[in-house]
Amino acid sequence: MTIGRQKDDASVPTEQQAGGQVVGKLACGELEGNSVSTLGSPGVRHWQATYLEHADLHDRGNIFFAAVEMTRMPMLITDPNQPDDPIVFVNGALLDLTLYQEDQLLGRNCRLLQGPDTDPRTVAEVREALAGQRAVAVDILNYKADGTPFWNALFIGPIFDKDGKLLYFFASQMDITQRRIHEQSYLQAQKMEAVGQLTAGLAHDFNNLLQVVNGNLELAQRMIDAKPQALQAIGRAQRAALKGGALTQQLLTFARKQRLEPRRINLNALVLEFSEMLVRTLGQEVQLQLDLRPGLPPCVLDPTHLEMALLNVLINARDALGGGGTVSVGTSVLSDARKLAVHHLAPGQYVVICVVDQGCGMTPEVLRRATEPFFTTKGPGTGLGLAMVHGFVQQSHGRLDIESKPGVGTTVRMIFPVADQAGAAHAPAAQARPVPADGKATILLVEDNEDVRELGRIMLEAHGHAVVSAASGEEALRLLEEHEGGGHGPIGLLFSDVIMPGGMTGVQLAEEVRRRRPSLPILLATGYMEQLPDARSLPFPVLPKPYQESELMSRIADALAGHGARPHPASV
């Protein structure tokens, strides 16, 4: 809020009109209490207070009255000399804004525009200014005649006679609801982006630490001579490390920096394939109802991440129902231009997967924060479920829409472009390669972190592989050439970290090795995908960190055999 100067402050510049019959005190850029400037710049030349010789409200036969009635700026005048400071004049624009009739406003105090969510502190500030006969500019939540709330950029200024007696208060209004919504959305997006950048920046180092912790716990478990208490302690530490890794992956999904493996899929087929898991998740007291649109066009998504997103939404729906009920999962096609505009989507055709429950619903405040990371209304919970869903949908070029009302229920829509618009991502078909008879190979292990590199070497050698280690991409290329031309035997597989400080990244190394040795199997590992060029079409398999020994050995075996990712049942 900004309050104007005292009426007897002689330092305020004035301006005279009509041969001195009207005197105005200039605003001087001081009345900028509105979050949205109605002028586009600080008001300097408009008046914050007026002194009149003649103040006849019934004198309306002049051009100035016509201007007030023709303007699209809502205006009103109140009379503080009457009991309760009633409204004595409104122009047509104010009637258009508030939806009231003139006779419903005249004689009433302006408080009739207030409602349940009007901030009492703002009202108190306005009253303070009026009691001091001073101008005031605020943003206040008002209500129309039909109960619709709107944000009002309100300006009030006093009108005095020549002797300084207060005659009227003049007020102008402006509906800034859409601007406030866009402003809040922008600030929320900035906050979420900052959290995402922080998460992604920490993920690489944190996942390397978890890799060392979990990997060495696996080795220690294998070395201990079946002492139950020691094995139980190691098991607890392993579970904690794995939970830490899962938490990091959820944060990266929220930050839209998780590796996705999109495929051309049919949402109906995915829901049907996954329905058994959904039924088990909902439990016996909650029924699952499917409403799938026939002939749904395909879209390009990572099916595993979509299943996890759907599962998170279903868990929220189950918890909202409490004692039981029905949860509906439906699919549809969205192409209507008006509905696309509501969802801020470009023209085109989209597929929608929708989850509806009739549970407790969310208040507007909870709904506004529903996709924030770590925000939860549940006792036990990470607050990452909807944050992860939102991140996945955004990274998949889609839109997450949530509608909810207390006591009515919640509808969650995940909206995705159809396959032809998004461009189907087809991974290059993997070619089967001759596997060594014993399934073992000489592996070129490239990792800049010494602890992670040593751990990888121990795991690989424990399973019979020979290991050649390098701390950088440049060293790896040199070792590759030495083994090609020397008597050490050829390298059978490249296993490299993606992000290495300085010089060559793991992707650049893989591309150069592919150029020199087209048939050499390659496996990359990382816990942070931000620096990957277009991860949607990366031609190399990627093992996410932190990984377990069994996962590593399985991916090594697949890479040696030339096996690509297994097709999802919903793939088309």
Image: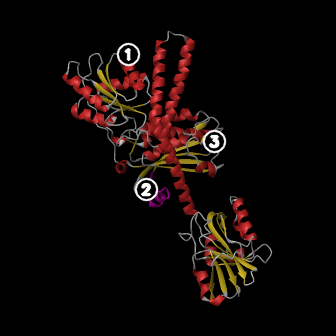
Give left or right: position of 59 versus 472. right
Looking at marks 1 and 3 on the same chain, the residue that comes earlier in the sequence is marked by 3
Residue on which disc 1 sits: 462
Residue at 57%, 35% (x, y): give it.
282
349 to 304, vertically: above or below: below
Q: Amino acid at mark 3?
A: Thr
Which amino acid, mark 1?
A: Ala
Q: Secondary structure at mark 1?
A: helix
Q: Position of residue 514 (x, y in %)?
A: 25, 33
Circle 2 packing at 10 Å, graded few (<14), some (14-19), many (20+), is some
Residue that numbered label 3 is attached to:
377
Expressed as whole percent of the image width and height from the top left, the position of residue 18 reads 63, 89
Q: Quadrant of the C terminus?
A: top left
Residues 437 and 480: in front is 480
Pick the quarter of the image with the N terminus.
bottom right
Eye-nearest disc, 1 or 3: 1
Q: Pinpoint residue 6: horizontal percent, then vertical percent.
A: 71, 72
